[in-house]
């Protein structure tokens, strides 16, 4: 594995990397909840859970939605995992439900976890943990730390607004085992646009910038335990971005051979709705691209830049004429704008690093309204029936 901020980097990578120095995560207390009760310590937790198998992480936060929506999201996940249990009854599964909270919300977070963890069973336990602050990666790292004594073979990460198609998770688990429980596999996710102008624009842009090789998205991804054994570094701004760069193999004929999207494991989610949320999400994504390419060895960074991020932007990368010259020109134009933003962010970080004033924080992606595809469909049906 390339492994983080190692050697083999160019001068400009080191210059850009110096401009980003996030604060270390605070040592905040975590409240554990299992079977509807607050647990005194992690030792009690370990005694109640199976070892090995898969950890299944569902991260969320109090302000995301109400308890009813949280219950619906958890039930949908548990129903999808039932297919996994039927196909592999010998495989231990443990659901980890992370509930982040803001100031004054701890009691509400614990109360919700009391209600939600009661849905677990002996065969499919649900462990809740409440932690203050924001950021999905903090939840991921907390789950990894809490579960380390259990030795999960792999981790299935998903989001609370993903709608799983029939047999989606069972197919994902099957493919993971077919590959020898290595690398990462992900569901084929369909992004359903909302009716806002920003969502429709993002849908059109994404349609012409699809990279030649697909890689798993953290909204529904199963990754080998050894890939994330040490947690996700504080410098990473996206969990799936960390997995991608850790598994990218620049020396292989197919650099993405350790990353696979399973076509018949299907799911859906809704795009961020408002213009403000969309711009914040794009900004964080851009900083994620820049900082990752600055931190990893140049062969890895170059492979990502030319083979994925800027694919089709000739002469930086190969021209992509698939779909015809008009589509190729549209792709080139979007990628050229993206390159301009990328260079602007990279230059800004380099200046910050030279001035000794590195960037400490990048705001989270969005504060968009929570809406699962199932709930969105029900709302649309109700509106149509009026």
Image (tube, rainbow, N blue to C red):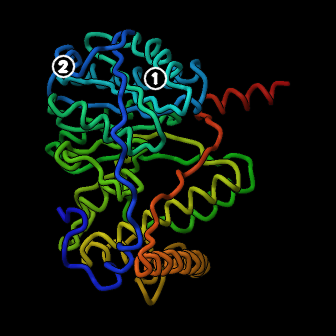
Residue 169 against residue 195 in the figure, above or below? above
Q: Eyeballing the image, is 214 above or below 312?
A: above
Q: Looking at the rendered structure, which numbered label has been put on residue 297?
A: none
Q: Residue at coordinates 29% horizontally, 25% vertically from top-left?
A: 84
Let me know if residue 328 appears in the view: no
Q: Which mark lies nearer to you, 2 or 1?
A: 2
The answer to whether residue 87 is seen in the rendering is yes
Q: Quadrant of the N terminus?
A: bottom left
Q: Earlier in the sequence, mark 2 or mark 1?
A: 2
Which is nearer the eye, 44 or 140?
44
Query: In the visual, does 140 lie left or right of 69?
Result: left
In the picture, measured across the screen, residue 47 lies left or right of residue 84, that is left
Q: Secondary structure at mark 2?
A: helix
Rendered image: mark on residue 74: 1
Q: Quarter of the image holding residue 324?
A: bottom right
Q: Residue at x 18, y 19 (%)?
A: 43
Please rate how many residues cluster around mark 2, counting C-alpha atoms within 10 Å: few if below 14, some from 14 to 19, many from 20.
few
Residue at 60 percent across and 80 percent down: it is: 333
Residue at the farthest front position: 356
**Percent position of residue 74, x then y:** 46, 23
- Judge by depth and name the residue closer to the eye, 326 or 90: 90
Q: Is residue 18 above or below residue 180?
A: below
Horizontally, is 283 left or right of 196 in the view? left
Taking depth in this image into account, of 332 and 226 the one nearest to the observer is 226
Percent x, y for residue 239? 37, 50
Q: Position of residue 191 (x, y in %)?
A: 55, 48
Residue 27 in percent (x, y) is at: 33, 39
Q: Give the labeled residue for mark 2.
A: 43
| Element carrying mark 1 | helix
Rounded to the nearest whole Å, what is the CA distance between mark 2 and mark 1?
25 Å
- Find residue 237 and report its image quarter: bottom left
């Amino acid at each position: 594995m390339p492994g983080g901020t190692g050697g083999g980097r160019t001068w400009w990578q080191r210059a850009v990397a110096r401009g980003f120095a996030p604060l270390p995560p605070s040592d905040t207390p975590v409240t554990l909840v299992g079977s509807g009760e607050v647990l005194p310590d992690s030792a009690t937790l370990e005694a109640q859970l199976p070892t090995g198998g898969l950890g299944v992480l569902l991260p969320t936060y109090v302000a995301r939605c109400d308890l009813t929506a949280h219950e619906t999201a958890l039930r949908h996940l548990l129903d999808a995992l039932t297919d996994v249990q039927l196909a592999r009854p010998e495989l231990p599964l443990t659901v980890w439900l992370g509930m982040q909270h803001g100031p004054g919300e701890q009691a509400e977070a614990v109360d919700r976890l009391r209600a939600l963890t009661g849905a677990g069973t002996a065969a499919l336990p649900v462990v809740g943990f409440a932690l203050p602050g924001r950021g999905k990666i903090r939840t991921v790292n907390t789950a990894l730390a809490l579960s380390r004594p259990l030795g999960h073979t792999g981790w299935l990460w998903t989001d609370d607004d993903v709608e799983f198609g029939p047999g989606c998770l069972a197919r994902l688990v099957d493919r993971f085992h077919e590959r020898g429980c290595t690398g990462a596999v992900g569901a084929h996710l369909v992004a359903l646009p909302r009716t806002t102008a920003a969502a429709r624009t993002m849908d059109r842009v994404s349609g012409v910038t699809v990279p030649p090789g697909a890689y798993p998205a953290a909204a529904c991804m199963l990754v080998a335990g050894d890939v994330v054994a040490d947690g996700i570094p504080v410098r990473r701004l996206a969990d799936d971005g960390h997995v991608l760069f850790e598994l990218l193999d620049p020396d292989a004929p197919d650099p993405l051979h350790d990353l696979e999207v399973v076509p018949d494991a299907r799911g859906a989610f809704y795009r961020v709705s408002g213009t403000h949320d969309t711009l914040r999400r794009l900004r964080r994504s851009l900083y994620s691209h820049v900082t990752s390419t600055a931190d990893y060895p140049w062969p890895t960074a170059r492979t990502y830049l030319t083979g994925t991020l800027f694919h089709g932007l000739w002469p930086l990368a190969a021209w992509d004429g698939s779909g015809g010259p008009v589509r190729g020109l549209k792709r080139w134009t979007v990628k050229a704008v993206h390159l301009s933003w990328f260079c602007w962010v990279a230059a800004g970080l380099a200046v910050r690093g030279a001035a000794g004033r590195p960037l400490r924080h990048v705001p989270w992606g969005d504060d968009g309204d929570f809406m699962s595809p199932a709930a969105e469909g029900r709302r649309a049906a109700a509106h149509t029936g009026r």
